[in-house]
């Protein structure tokens, strides 16, 4: 009978896969066995970092269950379901629809990944923002060029393993199925996204780029037709709306047409950046490279004056990227390559903002959180100019002093010394300052002058929620509209968005089967 075991290994032992598997066989009392890893995590709290590995050991004649992704079907002539957006919610909705025998037609406002890469190069070097092709919009969504972190706590929302197996099938390393905090890497994700697209098309689905939805018609509580910027009219039976958290034009259009949407709390703050070697020394208390340890990460939460201040999207060995989606705004995000071998570590460091913060924007109704978000992005742009990001040394920020100069930074468009209090509200800045003071005592060296704040980090989640009923996942006013993923306020990351895409696809398919 298979045995599930959990064993501990030193970093040196962990680096030798054959040694690890032999140890599992020895403990299980089996000489001829198959070892399948289920989870690996790193515990660096003690004097010696330890890897904890959980594995299932199968004896002779015992076969491990085969991992399954989404079933491929021929849907060339099947009933269509339209999907707006080709991020993880949209792509996995498409894969799920194919499995259920429906033809997905995905309409994406941006470009395919290869063309999108050119626009990102222009954004970084020439500081020109393409409003439909940037770090947030384009094939694969915001996750494609923002790292590919796959960690989620959303196990109750669906089959996470199925999502991971599909990614492995299209080119991801199998390690994502057992790492405690799986990660693909910005350098690997574009190829995986291309393979998924090719698979969808081979099955009979469609993906159309440069097709931003600009209008739709509703009759008898149903969307009948949608119209894209090219003037194309698409008859609709069911519409999965998976536009991502930055689709302000879509939120504005829905509100303008009288569809219910709601303002939603989100988090606002900065990116913290340190030399990666410093974070390694703080977390491991030893040389990471010499001890076979990966670049260190951190996860921080502090309560300051009744609100949580927390790290977000931590990128070991990473890059701070310009995530603006329109001219005249500065937005920062972070990503890491698959090896996480860059010089710097960066992380969002943010505070949740809510109705109290949006009070001055009440005249915008359900768009008030969106306009509050846009205010600070515009302020950051005006403070430094031309996509240059305002920045300040951590120690100077804590002491309320403008930095005379700044250390090297990974943000390619460049940084300028500014007081970060100018690009955040007093309440947000006060809480971030208080949290850094506490962390400076808990993590010796964290408040170094080589650490900086770069702003603003504002696209942590959607500032809008598009309501849907719990049973059928339909919008309360439009029965064949399925608000989905991060943009609708029901996900926060690649895996949770993919899971929500699958749920919406299943709900749409179930409804269409009875129509």
Image (cartoon, rainbow, N blue to C red):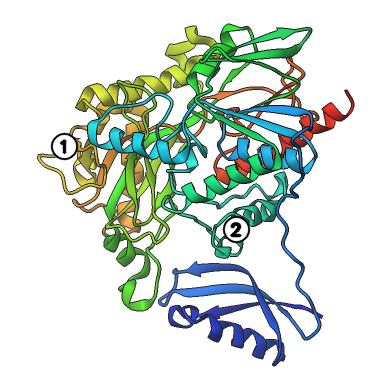
**Crowding near pointer 2: few (<14 within 10 Å), some, many (20+)?**
some
Q: Residue furthest left?
A: 404
Question: Decide: marks 2, 1 in contact (CB < 8 A)?
Answer: no
Distance in Å between CA atoms under marks 2 and 1: 49 Å
Judged from this view, the residue extending furthest toward the right is 514
Residue assigned mark 2: 168
Task: Specify few, some or many for label 1: CA neighbours under 10 Å numbering under 14, 14-19, or 20 or more.
Answer: some
7 versus 42 height, above or below? below
Q: Position of residue 177 (x, y in %)?
A: 61, 61
State the quadrant of the C terminus.
Answer: top right
**Is there any visible trace of residue 159 in the rendered image?**
yes
Q: Is residue 141 left or right of residue 286?
A: right
Q: Relative to 358, does residue 278 appear above or below in the rendering?
A: below
Which sits earlier in the primary sequence, circle 2 or circle 1?
2
Q: Is residue 278 left or right of residue 324?
A: left
The residue shown at (56%, 39%) is 492
Q: Position of residue 260 (x, y in %)?
A: 65, 14
Which secondary structure, mark 2?
Answer: helix
Q: For the point 27% across and 61% down, which residue is it?
A: 278
Visible in this render: residue 148?
no
Give the mark count: 2
Q: Which dot marks residue 401?
A: 1
Q: Quadrant of residue 3?
A: bottom right
Q: Position of residue 481 (x, y in %)?
A: 71, 21
Tell me the element at label 1. loop
Q: Quadrant of residue 107?
A: top right
Taking depth in this image into account, of 144 and 272 the one nearest to the observer is 144
């Amino acid at each position: 009978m298979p045995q599930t075991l959990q064993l501990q290994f030193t970093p040196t032992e962990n680096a030798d896969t054959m040694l690890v598997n032999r140890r599992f066989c020895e403990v299980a009392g089996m000489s001829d066995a198959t070892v399948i890893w289920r989870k690996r995590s790193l515990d660096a709290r003690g004097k010696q970092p330890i890897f904890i590995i959980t594995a299932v050991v199968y004896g002779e004649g015992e076969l491990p269950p085969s991992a399954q992704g989404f079933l491929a079907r021929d849907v060339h002539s099947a009933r269509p379901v339209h999907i707006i957006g080709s991020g993880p919610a949209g792509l996995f909705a498409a894969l799920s629809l194919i499995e259920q025998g429906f033809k997905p037609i995905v309409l994406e406002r941006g470009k395919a990944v290869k063309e999108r890469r050119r626009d990102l190069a222009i954004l970084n070097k020439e500081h020109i923002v393409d409003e439909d092709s940037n770090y947030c919009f384009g094939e694969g969504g915001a996750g494609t060029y923002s790292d590919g972190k796959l960690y989620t706590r959303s196990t109750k929302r669906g089959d996470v393993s199925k999502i991971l197996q599909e990614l492995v099938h299209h080119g991801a390393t199998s390690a994502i199925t057992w790492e405690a905090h799986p990660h693909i890497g910005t350098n690997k994700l574009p190829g995986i996204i291309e393979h998924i697209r090719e698979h969808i098309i081979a099955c009979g689905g469609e993906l159309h780029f440069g097709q931003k939805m600009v209008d739709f018609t509703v009759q008898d509580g149903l969307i009948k037709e949608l119209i894209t910027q090219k003037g194309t009219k698409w008859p609709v039976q069911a519409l999965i709306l998976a536009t991502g958290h930055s689709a302000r034009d879509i939120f504005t259009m829905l509100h303008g047409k009288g569809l219910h949407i709601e303002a939603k709390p989100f988090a606002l703050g900065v990116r913290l950046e340190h030399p990666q070697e410093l974070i390694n020394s703080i977390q491991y208390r030893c040389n990471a490279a010499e001890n076979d340890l990966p670049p260190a990460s951190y996860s921080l939460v502090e309560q300051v004056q009744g609100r949580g201040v927390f790290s977000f999207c931590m990128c070991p060995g990473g890059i701070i990227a310009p995530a603006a989606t329109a001219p005249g705004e500065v937005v920062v995000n972070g990503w890491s390559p698959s090896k996480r071998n860059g010089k710097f570590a960066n992380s969002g460091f943010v505070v949740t903002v809510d109705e109290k913060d949006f009070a001055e924007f009440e005249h915008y109704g359900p768009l008030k959180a969106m306009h509050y978000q846009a205010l600070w992005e515009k302020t950051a742009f005006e403070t430094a100019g031309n996509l240059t990001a305002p920045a300040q040394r951590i120690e100077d920020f804590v002491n309320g002093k403008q930095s005379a100069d700044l250390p090297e930074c990974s943000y390619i468009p460049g940084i300028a010394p500014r007081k970060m209090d100018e690009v955040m509200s007093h309440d947000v800045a006060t809480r971030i300052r208080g949290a850094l003071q506490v962390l400076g005592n808990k993590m010796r060296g964290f408040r170094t002058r080589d650490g900086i704040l770069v702003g603003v980090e504002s696209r942590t989640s959607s500032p809008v929620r598009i309501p849907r009923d719990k049973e059928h996942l339909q919008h309360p006013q439009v029965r064949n509209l399925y608000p989905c993923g991060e943009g609708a306020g029901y996900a926060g990351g690649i895996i949770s968005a993919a899971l929500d895409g699958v749920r919406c696809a299943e709900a749409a398919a179930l409804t269409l089967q009875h129509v």
